């Protein structure tokens, strides 16, 4: 193990920022030894009490109220950017110019122009690891669906159906925030839909075309709440609070054609009452079918040629060390223990640190790059264009 530590900072102390903070803390506890030691340096948030609370909970040395202090600190090597999408480009450019490796939450930016500029940073700074945080790439069940599809266990995959339904915006008294601002396509589609699309391409390969898109805003106004708000779930404003217009989509649906010729059907929502975090992928092939559900993250459901005659249909297969990521990914890595979404962040942090340290032998697959994040932004933009053109087909460059 290298004696030189890598110093880490997290910009953003909300729900996802705290999960990044925890992931850097846990990254050295999974898989094989060999990572450099990690110094938990700084948590930054515009609302300093949030940063102070996160730093205290996760063992970081200090908290600051301005992300520029992170850029100006020569001791920091690695930075997570976990703030509003519109801020990603400015912060990423400053961090790259300061020689820092960057892991930026998805979607990569608030606009396609900003995403293109961020992707260009890779060419300008080839010495840096610049990654987009698609954590579901590290989910053992989704990775197994991709393996089954690639290795022919499902015959020829002909159709993927995916949805990601959440209810964080179902209450009309949930306050207006950055998630509800920006153009159509940057709402539910940009938030949970970006994960859905990236997972679909991991399993089925590249999307060549989207069509039939609809973007719907169900709750057109939301109350304005003064002061800092962390997260948003369970936070409501007074009924008589002033209101502002919601600018983007609560619901998005579309179809797709993969480069392989397979079909895709997709839907996502942030106003799905009673479904706090419901993501599901189903792959249908000529010789088998497989399904993964986030709320049953310790298993997949599978029907294939090994099913006994007369006793076919989907059967439960528990996540076990034969699945990607699971072996040595937990202190209890055996079937029946299960997995949560939080562990994906730890696996992502481990892979990122391997890239920074130049570890290649036995390494996890590399993180999604800024270029990958830009590609996903182009797909989301194509969905928005399809909706604006009344469902017309739009090719993906």
Image (cartoon, grey):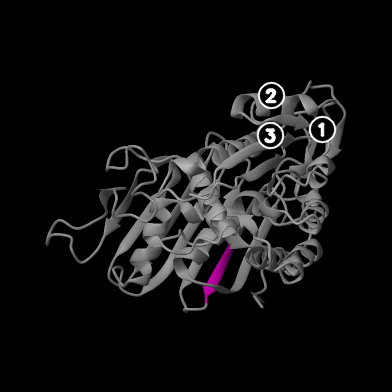
Categorize mark 3 by other alpha carbons within 10 Å: few (<14), some (14-19), many (20+). Answer: some
Q: Nearer the viewer, residue 362 or 327?
A: 362
Measure the alpha-carbon separation of dots 3 and 2. Answer: 10 Å
Measure the alpha-carbon separation of dots 3 and 1. Answer: 13 Å
**Which comes sooner in the sequence, label 3 or label 2?**
3
Residue under numbered circle 1: 65
Q: Which residue is drawn at the image coordinates 45% and 60% (left, top)? A: 363
Residue under numbered circle 2: 53
**Which comes sooner in the sequence, label 1 or label 2?**
2
Q: Which residue is drawn at the image coordinates 54% and 72% (left, top)? A: 206
Residue 393 location (% of width, % of height): 64, 75
Magenta segment range?
254-258
Q: Nearer the viewer, residue 236 or 95?
A: 95
Categorize mark 2 by other alpha carbons within 10 Å: few (<14), some (14-19), many (20+). Answer: some
Q: Is residue 8 above or below residue 108?
A: above
Residue 245 location (% of width, % of height): 84, 41
Figure quadrant of residue 340: top left
> Is residue 291 found inside the magenta-colored segment of the image?
no
Residue 52 location (% of width, % of height): 72, 25
Categorize mark 1 by other alpha carbons within 10 Å: few (<14), some (14-19), many (20+). Answer: some
Residue under numbered circle 3: 14
Residue 271 location (% of width, % of height): 63, 40
Specify whether 46 is left or right of 317: right
């Amino acid at each position: 193990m290298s004696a030189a530590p890598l110093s880490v900072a997290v910009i953003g102390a909300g729900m996802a920022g705290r999960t990044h903070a925890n992931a850097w803390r846990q990254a050295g506890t999974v898989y094989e030894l060999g990572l450099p030691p990690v110094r938990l340096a700084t948590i930054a948030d515009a609302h300093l009490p949030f940063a102070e609370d996160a730093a205290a909970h996760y063992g970081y040395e200090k908290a600051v109220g301005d992300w520029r202090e992170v850029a100006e600190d020569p001791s920091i090597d690695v930075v997570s950017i976990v703030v509003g999408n519109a801020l990603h480009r400015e912060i990423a450019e400053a961090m790259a110019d300061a020689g820092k490796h960057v892991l930026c939450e998805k979607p990569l930016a608030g606009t396609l122009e900003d995403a293109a500029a961020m992707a260009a940073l890779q060419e300008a700074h080839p010495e840096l690891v610049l990654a987009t945080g698609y954590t579901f790439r590290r989910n053992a069940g989704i990775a197994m669906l991709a393996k089954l599809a690639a290795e022919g266990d499902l015959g020829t995959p002909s159709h993927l159906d995916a949805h990601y339904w959440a209810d964080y915006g179902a209450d009309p008294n949930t306050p207006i925030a950055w998630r509800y601002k920006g153009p159509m396509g940057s709402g539910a589609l940009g938030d949970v839909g970006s994960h859905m699309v990236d997972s679909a391409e991991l399993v089925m390969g590249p999307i060549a075309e989207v069509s039939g898109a609809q973007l719907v805003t169900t709750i057109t106004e939301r109350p304005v709440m003064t002061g800092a708000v962390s997260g948003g779930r369970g936070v409501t404003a007074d009924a008589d609070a002033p209101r502002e217009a919601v600018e983007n989509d609560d619901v998005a649906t579309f179809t797709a054609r993969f480069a392989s010729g397979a079909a895709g059907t997709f839907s996502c929502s942030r106003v799905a009452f009673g479904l706090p975090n419901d993501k599901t992928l189903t792959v249908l092939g000529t010789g088998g079918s497989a399904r993964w559900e986030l709320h049953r993250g310790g298993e997949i459901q599978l029907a294939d040629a090994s099913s006994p005659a007369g006793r076919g249909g989907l059967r439960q297969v528990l996540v076990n060390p034969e699945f990607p990521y699971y072996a040595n990914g937990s202190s209890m890595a055996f079937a029946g223990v299960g997995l949560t979404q939080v562990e994906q962040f730890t696996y992502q942090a481990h892979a990122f640190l391997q890239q920074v340290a130049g570890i290649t032998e036995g390494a996890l697959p590399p993180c999604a790059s800024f270029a990958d994040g830009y590609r996903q932004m182009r797909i989301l933009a194509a969905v928005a264009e399809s909706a604006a053109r009344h469902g017309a087909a739009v090719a993906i460059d």
